[in-house]
Image: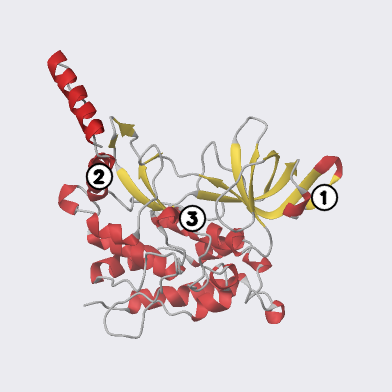
Amino acid sequence: MRAQLRLAAAILALFAASGVTLPARRHSSSVKAAAGDREGAQRAAVLARAQVWRSVDVRKADLLAGPRDERSFARNATITCEYLDKKLSGLSPKFACKLPDGDELKVKYGGTNGEVYGELLATRLLWALGFGADAMYPVNVICRGCPQPLGGIERPGGEYRFDPALVERKMAGKEWPRDGDPGWSWRDLAEVTPVRGGAPRAQRDALTLLAVFLQHTDSKPQQQRILCLGGINENTCSRPFLMISDLGLTFGAASLANSNQASGANFERWRSTPVWRSEPGCVGNLDKSFSGTLDKPVIGEAGRRFLAVLLQQLSDAQLHDLFDVARVKLRVREPGHALSGFPSIDEWVSAFKQKRDQIVSKRCA
């Protein structure tokens, strides 16, 4: 041992005599902490300036057609695509495929898949009201090369038909940051700062109350995205916008395990779930799922009124179109109970208006 110490001392003396200094040992934990601090500061700055709503003419929203641009699809269009062997997140039936021009699509499908109905309903509604959401289009999909276990209707030539089905178009904007992000939790809305250009509390509360109205049960951070509507310039997010990117488990009732049957387009559960809790004040009636971040939110009067004004602008004809385009007549009244029958579009519209009235008639201290 003494010999080893003498050898080490001799080596150090040799380096000292030669004028060479040994590099200082960097502590990886300190480096990671510093990087984390920088990322945290950048994220905080983006959240502080974030918006959640854009002014729109609600009365002119075409809920049958949805958002229209060069990437949109006509209602119930038949599209043909090549299957892509690509793993997609989530548990609901879905697959990736490619159009002849190379455009890649995500397809959700299945008559018993509540997300096929709930996601179309929720994204169209948020879009019509001015909140952020991806665009979903109801289509019939002819998939070439799809594996038989996916469950499509077999056709000649190795093709399979999927109907009902949805295809997704991402909301325009660059995701923050570039290398991926876990998204934002509903607690992050408190970090938005109006004096720094962020959305006022009324708009944030309106979005939160709308999530309660929809029974957005799977509210983990990955279900919400931060978009830079003006792009990303020198690592700076231009016009940050907070949107909900996965609304499949909506128009049912919140469930601890994010159940497709209970939480995805379950007419009886949604109709019978009050918007408000019975306790004093304006507390949204939404229980957090095991993965969720939104739990019994307290809503201010300005936010309640903001959402009420938006919802009241939707006509009966628009509401009928909303539930018609979502093909809700294909979804049993209470999934898991085949003999419960099928609710009509008018029943869905009536339930919507009753829940809207709960928001309109409420007053928050």
**Mark 3, residue position:** 246
Cα distance, mark 1 to mark 2?
54 Å
Q: Residues within 10 Å of mark 1 (few under 14, many from 20)?
A: some
Image position, residue 39 (x, y; %):
27, 42
Q: Earlier in the sequence, mark 1 or mark 3?
A: 1
- Assess whether mark 2 and mark 3 are in contact (beta carbons under 8 angstroms): no
**Mark 1, residue position:** 154
- Compared with 54, 113 (above or below) is below
- Using the rendered image of the protein, determine whether residue 356 is visible from the camera's viewpoint: yes
Label 3 or label 2, whichever lies nearer to me, is 2
Quadrant where the image shows the C terminus: bottom left
- Using the rendered image of the protein, determine whether residue 56 is visible from the camera's viewpoint: no
Quadrant where the image shows the N terminus: top left
Image position, residue 266 (x, y; %):
57, 72
Residue depicted at 44% across the width and 55% down the height: 223
Cα distance, mark 3 to mark 2?
31 Å
Cα distance, mark 1 to mark 3?
29 Å
Question: Tag 3: residue type?
Answer: Asp
231 or 96: nearer the viewer: 96
Residue depicted at 55% across the width and 38% down the height: 71
Image position, residue 355 (x, y; %):
44, 75
Question: Tag 2: residue type?
Answer: Ala
**Mark 2, residue position:** 33
Helix, strand, or loop for circle 2?
Answer: helix
Q: Horizontal placement of 246 versus 109: left or right?
A: left
Q: Earlier in the sequence, mark 1 or mark 2?
A: 2
